[in-house]
Image (cartoon, rainbow, N blue to C red):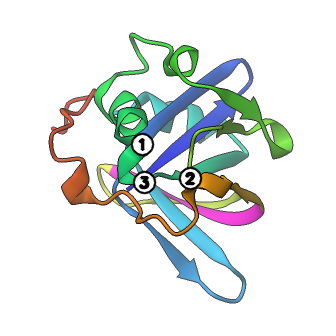
Amino acid sequence: MCVVTAAAGDERAGCLVGFASQCSMRPVRFVVWLSKVNRTYEVAAAADLLAVHLLTPQQFELAALFGGVSGDRVDKFAHTPWTVGYGGAVVLQEAAAWFIGTIEQRIDGGDHVGFVLDPVQCGEREKSEGQPLLRLADTLTIDPGHPVD
C-alpha cells in the first residue's frame, strides 16, 4: 500500500493506493493505478508528476486519512505536514520513504488508470529504516472515502 499525491495548478490531492508496482528495470519505471471516481485521479490527469509514499504500519493514521477521507470534502493536507518537492510535487513529511516521478504514460485499464512514472527524486526518514511496510492486511479496517462501485 502507498499514498499517491498529485498537484496541478492550485489543486492538490492524494489517496491510498493498493495497485502499484515497478514495471520496468531499463529504463526504471513504476506504475500506480488510480480509480477514475477518485479526486486524486482528476488532479493527476492534469499533472506532470506524482509523488509515491511508502508507509509503515505505525503510520496507519496517515493511511486512514488518505484512504478513508474524501478530498471532495476535506483538505487532507491541512491535517499532515507536507512540503514541495521536485517540480512542485507534494511530499508527505511523515512517510517512511517516497519518490517523485514524471508521468511518462497513462494507461486506461477500465475503472482505474495506470500512471507510468519515471522516478526523478527520492527520500526517506531515518526513523523508518528497517521497519516493515504497510500492507493491504494492515488497512482492511479503513472504509474507503470514495465508493468502490
Assign the magenta stretch its main secondary structure.
strand
Question: Would you call the spot at circle 3 few (<14 residues within 10 Å), some (14-19), or many (20 or more)?
Answer: many
Mark 1 vs 2, N-terminal side: 1
- Image spot of residue 39 (x, y percent): 44, 28
- Report the residue marked by disc 1: 59
76 drawn magenta: no
Q: Which residues are magenta?
A: 112-120
Mark 3 vs 2, N-terminal side: 3
- Report the residue marked by disc 3: 56
The residue depicted at 73 percent of the width and 39 percent of the height is: 89
When asked about the image quadrant of residue 137, the answer is bottom left
How far separated are the C-alphas under marks 3 and 2? 7 Å
User: Mark 2 and mark 3 in contact (Cβ < 8 Å)?
Assistant: yes
- Report the residue marked by disc 2: 96
Considering the image in quadrants, where does the C terminus appear? top left
Q: Secondary structure at mark 3?
A: loop
Q: Secondary structure at mark 2?
A: loop
Q: Amino acid at mark 3?
A: Thr
